Amino acid sequence: MGKVFEAITDELGQWLLAQPVFFVATAPLAQQGLVNCSPKGMDTFRVLGPREVGYLDLTGSGVETIAHVRENGRIVLMFCAFSGPPRIVRLHGSGDVVTPGSSAWPELRARFPDHAGARAVV
């Protein structure tokens, strides 16, 4: 049986940050649209508060995740243990896209290591 957390505890936050890979899934509102699930990693995830996280979106294949979040805000991040005891954690929520030029960009961007090709914080 799964366990629901009301907030990200210190222990859970440490575990999330220790995972080398996580997955981001979004979907458009249109029935004919495609669900998008993308692997992420490379130290691009941060716990911003007890009920808030962010990840640095790097230039890559496409911008389907950004388009979906802008359309409807729905997003889920999934983390799974690749070592140690089995564990899967899903963070269901709503997202915002913060891009260079936004007033929130400098503060959020400063929370992440210097990556070339950063196009947004989601």
Image (tube, helix red, strand yellow):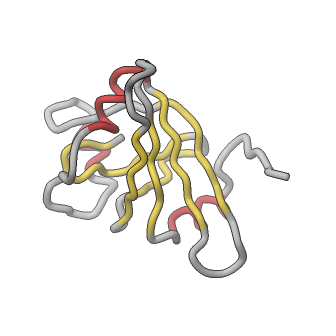
Which residue, as the protein is rendered here, is positioned at the far front? 32
Count the labels in the image: 0
List x then y, in percent, for residue 53: 48, 46
Left or right of 109: which side holds 89?
Answer: right
Residue at 35% x, 59% y is: 44
List x then y, in percent, for residue 56: 31, 51
Residue at 27% x, 63% y is: 113
List x then y, in percent, for residue 41: 38, 64
Residue at 60% x, 80% y is: 83
User: In the rendered view of the protein, which quadrant contains the C terminus?
Assistant: top left
List x then y, in percent, for residue 99: 21, 36
Left or right of 61: which side holds 45?
Answer: right
Residue at 16% x, 38% y is: 100
Q: Residue 28's quadrant in the figure?
A: top left
Q: Nearer the viewer, residue 32 or 95?
A: 32
Q: Nearer the viewer, residue 105 or 93?
A: 93
Left or right of 64: which side holds 29?
Answer: right
Which residue, as the protein is rendered here, is positioned at the far bottom? 84
